[in-house]
Amino acid sequence: MLIFNCTQAAQDFFTVTRKGEKQTIVTAPPASDMAEDAKHLSYADGSPARPFQWVLHAVTVKRKNCLVAMEVNTRLSITVTAVKKGDIEHFLAYFRANLLALISGYALAYDVWQPAEAETRENEGLAHLAETRMFRRSDRSVQAHINEVVHILRDAVDETPALFDNTGTLLRFNEFCNNYLRKSRAFPDQDYIVPAEEMLIYWQQQYLNATPEQVADIRQRLADRKRSKYQGIIEDITAKHQSSPQDKPAAADKTQVFFPQAGSVGDADLVFLDEMLAKYATEDSLENASTLHGFLTAIVSAPSMLPPSQWLADIWGGEGLQPAWKNIEEAQRFIGALFSMMNSISRELMESPQTFGAMFTGSYDCPEVADWCFGYTCGVSLDEEAWYEMPDALQDQLDLLDTYALLVEVGSQHLPQRELQERANHVIDAATRLHAYWLKQRTPMMMPANIGKPPPTTQPVVSQKLVGRNDPCPCGSGKKYKKCCLH
């Protein structure tokens, strides 16, 4: 049974006025907790229902009504554009068509289904989705991921207006969104999931009665295919990287890395930063000190200097997700350690880039670069359009970091030590080259001789005394402390 838990915007979308009275197909839920719905729902024939829970949200893009549905557990999203207000038939037709196309396409691409059996497999699942219920209920965690899809949708429509009119373009958009890494509370043992993959496995389990052994086989098949795909990308990029003498790492015979336990910023501060990131974690916050180090490296290397007000909240996943600090001392210590790390990164890249080290996880002999690279790509995303105005050779460097960031899905525990060290060297070399390129493009105020003397609004300031609740926040946002870092 398809269940759409409607946000307020979706409720309004499916509420129409007829003869002066408001009518809606959205009803009260049978239970406050989605997990309890199965106890209260049944199909038309009286058999127990198998709820398939989605959150449904409505937005307006370019004056067109769009609906975004996201499955609660797998976080797979289906976007339907240009829907007339209240037109549930149009929405359901396009929703089911896109859902089946995504699942079938993935199953065929990874040889989970054979072409001759695809239609049968689709229909076996579709039989359970013939009945639909729409309830007044939502989920904050899912809504945060829906908001990401809406953001991507707005950007996509700017570049491809045909998204509203072309079903093929819309399907490709949905494919793109569902290959994004996301995190779901339904998978506590996985840092990130790929929604399209998890939906395929869900479909196999729920509607095709896949055994645990069959599910394990599918997961292994998916992992093998991704490993092959990523390795091909890496080999292609590194081949270009090594094509000329001047492109080789500065010290190919030495791994230029350090780790949290090495104490470059200060052991106590690094442990504290790690603890705070874990203590106040959100689903979209930076995970650890390694990810934070990569994020800050991108900030100090960016095409233009970004004030803290433009990136500080992104450490925690965005505006409104900043920690409710235990006390003012805890908040001040975090801000102080944060800018200490940031200033250390800036000094190394400015004064001695040949010895710059990235704070990877793992061990010194077997560094793992995924977390650091993921943090770097998060920093790049704050001003992504400006970053991509680079020569192709440097674009390859950024693509390399982006590719390594995805290796969290593959894992590196079985790779040879030498390969891990070479990977670390490639990452460091890419980071220093990107910093050097953008440094040359900046205005004189941002050149080496003037570093440390920018306007007060853009220079990170670490206060050495207690800050009052109504004083300006030391992060430089311009807000009162009680409205910024303290809350």
Image: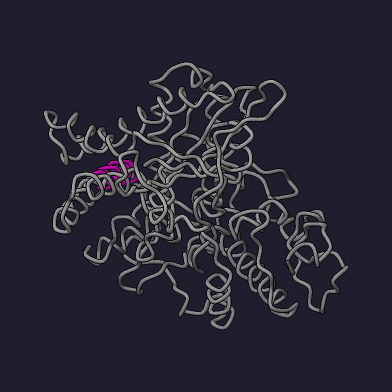
Q: How far across and down, in percent of the image, does residue 209 sit?
A: 18, 49
Decide which of 429, 304 is in the foreground and name it.
304
- Residue found at x 78% / y 55%: 454
Query: For this view, does 483 lie left or right of residue 223?
Result: right
What residue lies at 23% left-to-right and 44% top-to-bottom? Answer: 207
Q: Nearer the viewer, residue 452 or 181?
A: 181
Magenta stretch?
229-241
Q: Quadrant of the N terminus?
A: top left
Front residue of 348 and 362: 362
Report the label total.
0
Placement of the C terminus among the 4 image quadrants? bottom right
Q: Is residue 397 above or below residue 32?
A: above
Quadrant hosting residue 340: bottom right
Outermost residue, bottom side? 268
Q: Residue at x 37, y 60 (%)?
A: 187
| Residue at 52% from the left image edge and 40% from the top image edge | 56
Q: How far from the left and from the top, in percent, is residue 278? A: 52, 72
User: Does the magenta portion include 231?
Assistant: yes
Overall secondary structure of the magenta section: helix
Q: Is residue 246 visible?
A: no
Q: Is residue 149 magenta?
A: no
